[in-house]
Image: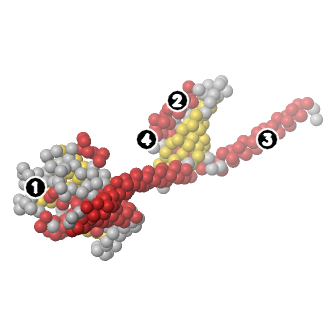
Amino acid sequence: MNKKELSDTAQQRLIEQTRKDDAYFRSIIENNSFYIIKTDLEGRYTYLNPFFCKMLDLQAEEWLGKESLSLIMPVDHAACIETVEKCFADPQNSFWVMLRKPTPNGVLHTQWEFKVLKDENDAPCELLCIGHDITPLILKQEQLLSLVDVAAEQNKRLVNFTYIISHNVRSHVANIIGILNISEDFEDSKMALGMIHDSTLSLDETLNNLNEIISIQANTSLPVAALNVFDEIYRIFQSIQALNSGPDTTISYQFDPSQVVNINPAYFESIILNLITNAFKYKSTERSLEIELNLYDEEKYKVLTFKDNGLGIDLGRYKDQLFGLYKTFHRNKDARGLGLYLIKTQIEAMKGKIEVESEVNVGTTFYIYFNQSDISIVSDTNNNL
């Protein structure tokens, strides 16, 4: 075998080995669990590996030459473009970015490494992007953040309860002990017993309030029923007519009387009852009381608006205290500061929310958001706490 034949044989073996290596590496690229794509300098697809196509349910040949941004959620376009610009500014290094992609099964959270590819003249020719799915990690992080929020809320409630116990309960007990200590100095024993009786009743009311709040917060599975809003509110109004000292009170319903809300009946009655009694309690002495109710849909909520033309609340001064326990904003002797706290607690127990607008001596509007998603309806409408 002469030198030429040896050279041709070596060259043939090199070609065969190159083909084998190419097939081997292509097999790795096309059968791994990573996303591998390439784009031209204008961001158009030049290659999509099978795994990427499978996860996004698309055909590679249909997407070659199309804009890569079209398979990225619009909210992440800026982050993608910024990462590409970094690659071209520093082509020796790769850069990472997290991108969300729409799929038939929902949003896919992905993490990518971008790197500029160069041609034989050392000029940028393509962009190589290697990515992987981080959706389970993102979902786990969201769950952890949710738990942190729950823990923070529980801690806030614990601080609140600590304040109640250390201040309200202890003050009642201290008052009773003080009366007992000086009871011998009272010439009239009935007076001493009367004072003890009053303090004991106040302590009992405080403990009952605490028990009611604990019952609400401990209820993780509330029975829900479909209630006719107009019928329920009208019934509640009728049941407390004796509390309405003004015969000229006007109540108007600005919604279809056939509308239904899915809610725990006991909580709904408690919420409406507190709103009505507050409207009666804090009405203006300068004008007739007017109450207006409306009901409309907003995303996953049924929103009930409860508007009155009463004394109003100075939100600039009291906004952060509005739903606090035992917080009062008027000088009424019968104000306990419990109603709004209970309303907020009950609404949040049903995964809803409450918002308020108010102006002093003009009136107040409450926006009650009743969550209507992920609930199971029961037939019994006489459920208690």
Residue 289 - label: 1
Vertical position of residue 236 compared to residue 299: above or below:
below
Specify the quadrant that holds the C terminus. Answer: bottom left
Q: x and y percent of residue 130 in the render?
A: 60, 41
Disc 3 marks a residue whose amino acid type is Gln
Residue 17 - label: 3
Check whether the beta carbons of the residues at disc 4 and disc 1 lie within 8 A of each other. Answer: no
Asked whether residue 278 is in view, the answer is no
Q: Residues within 10 Å of mark 1 (few under 14, many from 20)?
A: many
* Marked residue nearer the N-terminal end (2 or 1): 2
Question: Mark 4 — residue?
Answer: 75
Q: Secondary structure at mark 4?
A: helix
* Marked residue nearer the N-terminal end (1 or 3): 3
Disc 2/disc 1 C-alpha distance (Å) = 64 Å
Disc 1/disc 3 C-alpha distance (Å) = 93 Å
Instruction: Single out the residue that lies furthest toward the right.
Output: 1
Q: Residues within 10 Å of mark 4 (few under 14, many from 20)?
A: few
* Marked residue nearer the N-terminal end (4 or 2): 4
Check whether the beta carbons of the residues at disc 2 and disc 1 lie within 8 A of each other. Answer: no
Q: Which residue does the image show at 88% across and 31% down from the upper left?
A: 4
Disc 4/disc 2 C-alpha distance (Å) = 18 Å
Q: Residues within 10 Å of mark 2 (few under 14, many from 20)?
A: few
Q: x and y percent of residue 47 in the render?
A: 58, 41
Q: Secondary structure at mark 2?
A: helix
* Marked residue nearer the N-terminal end (4 or 1): 4
Question: Mark 2 — residue?
Answer: 85
Specify the quadrant that holds the N terminus. Answer: top right
